[in-house]
Image: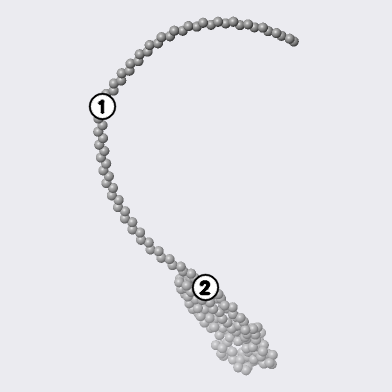
Amino acid sequence: MNQTTDSNVNQTVNSTSNVTSNNTNTNVNTNNTTSNNTNTNTNTNNNTNNNNNNNKSDIRQEIISPPPSAIAPTVMLGGNDTCTVTYSAAVQTQILGASGGGHVRDLNCERLKNSKTLYNMGMKVAAVALMCQDASVYRAMEMAGTPCPFDGSIGVEAKEKWELNPELQPTNIEQETRRNDQMEGAVKGILGAGIMVLLLGL
C-alpha cells in the first residue's frame, strides 16, 4: 500500500492590547490600648513536722534440743541352765533419759532342774519333796492318794503330819505369797506411775 499527503497552512494573527490600571490603597490603623494590671501574691507556708520514732526491739532466742535418745540395753542370758529371765526398758523426755535392765530368777525352773538332779542322783523322796513345794503338785499328790513327804515320813503318816501343821502346807504358803506379791506389785506400780508422770512433766 502506497500513500502520499501534501498540506499547506498559511495563518496571520494581529493582536493589540492596551491596559491602564490605577490602584490607590490607604490604610489607617489607630490602636489605643491601656492596661492596668495589679497582681498581689501573698504566700504564707507554715510547715511544722514533728517525727518521733521510738524503736525498741527485744529479741530473745532460745534453742532447746533434747538429749540423746535413751536406748534400752541388751541383757544377755547366762546360758540355758541358769533359769533367769531378762528385762530392759528405756524412758526419754525432753530433759532426762533413763534406761536399765536386769535378770529375774525363774523359781519354778530352778525347782524342776533341782528335782531332776536329785532324782538322777537316786534321791527320789527328796526329789518328790522338792516338787511338793509347788501348790499344784501338792494338791495333785493328795488327789492321787500319795501325800507329799513330811519330815522323813511318807504315806498316811505324812498326811497326818500335814494336817497337824496346816501353816506349812504349800497351798497356804502360796496364798500368802500371792497376797504379798499383789501388795508389792501395787506399790511398785504406783511408784512407777509417779516417776513416769514426773519425767513427762519435765
Q: Nearer the viewer, residue 48 or 116?
A: 48
Q: Position of residue 174 (x, y in %)?
A: 56, 83
The span from disc 2 to disc 1 (Cα, nearest Å) is: 103 Å
In the picture, measured across the screen, residue 35 lies left or right of residue 63, that is left
Q: Position of residue 79 (x, y in %)?
A: 64, 83
Quarter that holds the N terminus = top right
Q: Is residue 45 above or below residue 124?
A: above
Residue 146 in sight from this viewpoint? no
Q: Quadrant of residue 108?
A: bottom right
Q: Nearer the viewer, residue 14 or 200?
A: 14
Q: Is residue 92 above or below residue 51?
A: below
Q: Quadrant of residue 26?
A: top left
Is label 2 or label 1 in front?
Answer: 1
Q: Are marks 2 and 1 in contact (CB under 8 Å)?
A: no
Residue identifier under label 1? 34
Q: Position of residue 151 (x, y in %)?
A: 60, 93
Tell me the SS state at disc 1: loop
Residue identifier under label 2? 68
Q: Nearer the viewer, residue 77 or 146?
A: 77
The count of marks equals: 2
Name the amino acid type tagged 2: Pro
Q: Position of residue 175 (x, y in %)?
A: 55, 82
Disc nearer the start of the sequence (2/1) = 1
Tell me the SS state at disc 2: loop
Which residue is painted at 40% across and 11% down in the image?
Answer: 21
Quarter that holds the C terminus = bottom left
Which residue is painted at 26% across and 31% down in the image?
Answer: 37
Q: Quadrant of residue 58?
A: bottom left
